[in-house]
Image (tube, rainbow, N blue to C red):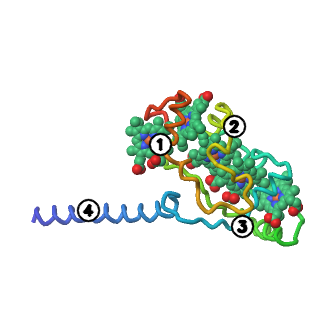
Amino acid sequence: MKKILFLGLFFTVIGGIVFLSILAQANVQKINPFNSNSLKQPFPFNHKIHNESGLECENCHLFVFTRTDPGIPRLEICLECHEGNTAPPFDILEKYSSNGGQIPWIRLYKLPRHVYFSHKRHAAIGKIACKTCHGDIGEKELPLDKPIMATLNMDTCMDCHEQRKVSNDCSACHR
Ligand code: HEC
Ligand code: HEC
Ligand code: HEC
Ligand code: HEC
Ligand code: HEC
């Protein structure tokens, strides 16, 4: 009897672990850029036209010099310039805003959770240009459908750190 109970418990636990890991797998595949072949943004945002109109990256990615995460601009920022323009392609902004929503941008660059990365440290304190890591996204007329993988790669981080004599202790990046 004891043995049967024990076996029952054993298989429940194993079943639970298998089930949870299947769940985790499904989740990871959805959000992990390492596994995505192609992302389609909800709206064909044009970086180039905004760049050429004299906007700086930090006018939209507001926190790039002050926080770890630069942020993707909220719809309110777009509407500061485009409010009231109902002709295509601007009508889509009106549509999102009259539904009280945001444009559901898909994040292109996302490190695993165990890695710490700060834009303030790199872009403001280290004075590293966006281009060094993000290439010419500012000159693109359409959203990228893939991240530049080197940007998210441990070897690339460590190569630059070695050149710049920055810490390559595991605990600097994994905290
Ligand atoms: C007018 C606002 C605006 C300006 C100015 C702007 N961006 Fe963006 N940026 C966006 C929006 C909206 C997205 C999300 C859609 C996309 O991926 O194209 C985005 C996405 C990005 C991403 C991908 C983020 C991610 O992980 O999903 C990077 C990197 C980026 N921008 C860099 C830059 C750089 C570098 C500049 C300056 C040369 C710049 N942006 C200027 C609005 C802007
Ligand atoms: C040293 C490399 C590096 C530099 C320089 C850099 N980035 Fe990034 N960027 C990254 C990495 C790595 C991520 C993913 C970060 C994460 O997941 O925590 C990222 C993510 C982003 C995102 C998406 C994050 C979000 O909050 O949604 C935007 C937007 C972005 N960067 C814009 C910029 C802009 C604008 C500049 C220049 C002012 C810049 N980055 C400079 C490496 C860099
Ligand atoms: C500081 C002002 C400013 C902000 C903020 C701004 N834009 Fe623009 N946008 C412009 C200018 C200038 C143009 C080019 C002239 C025009 O077409 O009106 C433009 C053009 C556009 C166009 C037409 C270009 C095309 O692809 O055909 C769209 C769509 C657009 N912006 C969407 C957005 C979105 C989405 C945001 C927020 C993420 C945004 N804009 C934020 C100033 C701005
Ligand atoms: C192009 C060069 C370059 C790349 C690529 C780069 N870094 Fe850095 N990193 C720097 C520099 C320079 C500093 C020091 C900035 C300062 O404080 O002056 C730094 C500092 C850091 C620090 C703080 C270190 C400490 O001593 O506490 C961390 C954490 C970090 N980087 C993580 C990363 C991660 C994670 C990546 C890859 C996703 C990365 N870096 C990619 C140049 C780079
Ligand atoms: C400069 C930043 C940086 C340093 C220093 C660093 N890592 Fe990483 N590490 C990363 C980044 C970014 C990733 C995620 C991308 C990847 O897997 O290449 C990562 C991923 C990993 C992973 C997960 C790999 C996988 O396949 O999922 C392990 C394990 C790891 N690092 C161990 C270490 C150990 C051990 C050290 C010290 C010898 C170390 N890291 C030092 C940035 C760093």
| Ligand 5 in which quarter | top left
Q: Which residue is mark 2?
A: 66
Q: CA distance from mark 2 to mark 4?
A: 46 Å
Residue 129 placement (x, y as % from top left) = 68, 40
Dot in front, 1 or 2? 1
Residue 110 shown left or right of residue 98 in the figure: left
> How many numbered badges does the structure rendering display?
4
Q: Is mark 3 within 8 Å of ligand 3?
A: yes
Q: CA distance from mark 3 to mark 4?
A: 44 Å
Residue 156 placement (x, y as % from top left) = 51, 42
What's under tag 1, amino acid-wise? Asp
Q: Earlier in the sequence, mark 3 or mark 1?
A: 3
Residue 27 placement (x, y as % from top left) = 47, 62
Q: Earlier in the sequence, mark 3 or mark 2?
A: 3
Looking at the rendered structure, which numbered label has been put on residue 43?
3
Residue 71 placement (x, y as % from top left) = 67, 49
Residue 133 shown left or right of residue 102 in the figure: left
Q: Which residue is mark 1?
A: 155
Q: Is mark 1 within 8 Å of ligand 5?
A: yes
